[in-house]
Amino acid sequence: MSIQRALKSLIDIILSVIALILLAIPFVIFALLIKLESKGPVFFRQERVGKEGKLFKVWKFRTMIDKAIHQGLGYQAAIDDPRITRVGKFLRDFGLDELPQIFNVLVRDMSMVGPRPTLEYQVKHYDSNQRRRLAMKPGITSLAVVSGRNGLAWAKRIELDLQYIDQWSFWLDVKILFKTLWVVLIKREGLYGEEGVNDPFVTPPSPDEIRKSGKEHVQ
């Protein structure tokens, strides 16, 4: 098992370097389109909870208006969310907004496959069993992503994350990576939760509470 985990780390580094080289030109194009459409940064970096509870800042392409978390649904997002830009909708539809997390993989905060990184307010409400999902590095994709994405309630996603941790193998990662291409690029289902609104797991902080805390970004 230790050999497999070492191989997982090595593959993460190799794939992240190759991906960043291949995606260099698309990244520049996406960056230009984001800047041309709306004011604000190209990327946003949002604090997430990683392995063993370590906090780190995740990279994403900005898909909403600047400081969107201070408006509307706050941390939540909806299919008809007016904060989402036109370029942002395209990026979200194909899962392209998540690609900058390759940087997180390169610096070892994340892995290509693992439980999706979540927000601190959610982790504070985990029970002892749910906290086991922090035993592995978070991933760009996961068993939960290829099993329904945001269409699943958080409780189900956590259940699948724990199943992934308990049954993990190098070949399971390979299977999830290939299945991700089909689910995210072809099927494009599960982008939003029931009735078009993403499940927050527990009641999230309100926009006013977020503003007072100094948090700037939205999922």
Image (cartoon, rainbow, N blue to C red):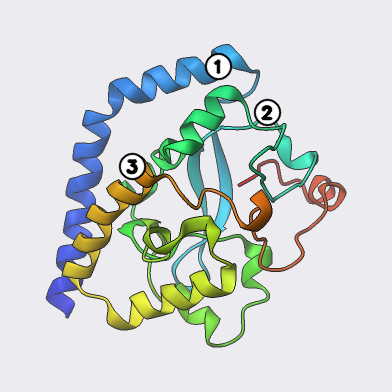
Describe the element under mark 2 as helix, strand or loop.
loop
Amino acid at the residue labelled 1: Lys
Amino acid at the residue labelled 3: Ile
Asked if residue 31 lies left or right of residue 75, the reply is left
At which x and y percent is residue 154? 58, 68
Res 11 visible: yes
Describe the element under mark 3 as helix, strand or loop.
helix
> What quarter of the picture does the N terminus occupy?
bottom left
Q: Is residue 112 above or below residue 123?
A: above
At which x and y percent is residue 48? 55, 57
At which x and y percent is residue 155? 57, 74
Which residue, given by chain and number where applicable, does mark 3 sit on? 186
Q: Nearer the viewer, residue 150 or 164?
A: 150
At which x and y percent is residue 8? 20, 63
Amino acid at the residue labelled 2: Ile
Asked if the residues shown at circle 1 and circle 3 are in contact, with their CB atoms under 8 angstroms apart, the answer is no
Which residue, given by chain and number where applicable, does mark 2 sit on? 65
Give residue 216's quadrant in the image: top right
Task: Give the alpha-carbon distance from disc 2 to disc 1, as whole Å.
Answer: 11 Å
Which residue, given by chain and number where applicable, does mark 1 sit on? 35
